[in-house]
Amino acid sequence: MNKHYWQTGFILLALMTLMGCAVVETATTVATTVGEATGAISKSQSQSIRKSTAAVSKSLEDFTPEQEYYIGRTVGAVVLGKYSASADAKVNAYLNVLGQTLAQVSDMPELFGGYHFLVLDSDDINAFATSGGHIFITRGLIRCCRTEDALAAVLAHEIGHVQLRHGMKAIEKARMTEALSILAQEGAKSFGSPEVAQLTQAFGGVISDITNTMINNGYSRSYEYQADAAAVSILQRMSYNPGALTDMLGVMTRQIKPGGSDFAKTHPSPQNRIAELKASGKSLAVTETPAIRKERFTKAVGHLL
Amino acid sequence: MFRYIFMIACLMLLGSLWLGSTAVAQKTMNVQVKESQLRATPSYLGKIVARTTYGSSVTVLEERGAWKRVSLGSGKNQGWMHNTALTSKKIALKAGQSNVGTSVTRDEIALAGKGFSEEVEAQYRKSNKNLDYTWINKMEAMKVSQEQMEDFISGGRLTPGGEGGRL
Ligand SMILES: [Zn+2]
């Protein structure tokens, strides 16, 4: 009996290690059925194993847009602990009309609370996007933009991070498991204070996973290249000049300070991003920006440049 | 002869299965964002014909790419909504008004206001008093109307929906 138990455990473990998260549920069903058949585990034991694995293997999809919104609010508050918001109403209004228009042509146009943009009062070259659609961009990064098309490229890159759910993917596996198992326990019954305390602790863990990656360590290079590719698609759909992204990166190359704790640390070098964009074979032809678009850009952000 | 009858019977069976599948395609979905709009055409440039809020049920009448033509409530209001505003999960609202029946399983419902929610944020803020949400609330209050976006597009000589357009 005991031996069977270990065998089943071993099979389960081996299967779970071998297969990706997406198929764990199926694999577990097979393994628990084997366990049941050999009499190694009781029916109720196997049911509870299946139940808990089901809760975990659904992972990201188990967070509703509402929950991603609340995660995003606090991630945003952490960003605003590092950088101060700029109260420049003219720039903020311009960023919001530009950004929200771009978000509508992204693959994720609707979020629980929509998309919102804010300028950060800093000369660093930096930007952040939360799962709740809060997008922050420093004055230093706006200074890398010579046209509205280039600024659109910057915002589209951040919308790309949201649409690809990069923030949520920064949550560590163990934390995800913990958080989702608490959420699964919750069921339809009302929540008492011990559960709220437990959930709040898991929430704190999720926030630190995301902000550590987003603010301190940076996402993987491949995530950054994916966000650049998403930005090019968004620009094309809105008929902005996709070559404005490489133009902006060219300016950034000259302005970025090596060793800084901003994009210098969290993003691949602008040269590498340009090289990756060129290698992707995307059309980055530079077209002339209409005069009227140049005028409104200068009017809105000229005083920052 | 017998073979022909058999074949016709098979074809009829297949045909009925096919018809059956299009009939069940008319399904119910639920709004998973705070607020959303129904539009006259499958595009964000489409005129807004109705508005809807979190937890509302819609009946899907037709699908085109990332858009679904839906009807609201009595079916009087019909229009197009983007996929990302909708979920097949039923949504149990806090206030008691809900579209959730009694026989749904945990996997089929999403509980509004549960999990990482307003309540958890409030609790978290109690022990992280250094966090300031003033500007989070201010930025969330920065709204842009459909009209402002249309003016911005035409004013900037933008022609969305051309190459690979989604609008
Ligand atoms: Zn990035």
Image: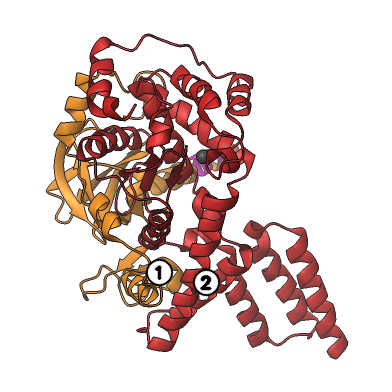
Chain colours: A red, B orange
Q: In the image, what residue type sits under mark 1?
A: Phe
Name the image quarter holding the N terminus of chain A. bottom right
- Can the viewer see residue B2? no
B28 magenta-colored = no
Q: Main secondary structure of the magenta part?
A: helix
Name the residue beneath numbered marker 2: A179
CB contact under 8 Å: marks 2 and 1: yes
B11 magenta-colored = yes
The residue that appears at 36% across and 59% down in the rendered structure is A73
Q: Vertically, is A195 above or below A216? A: below
Name the residue beneath numbered marker 1: B116
Name the image quarter holding the C terminus of chain A. top left
Q: In the image, what residue type sits under mark 2?
A: Ala
Q: Vertically, is B3 above or below A56? A: above
- Magenta part of the chain: B7-12
Residue A280 % position (x, y): 61, 23
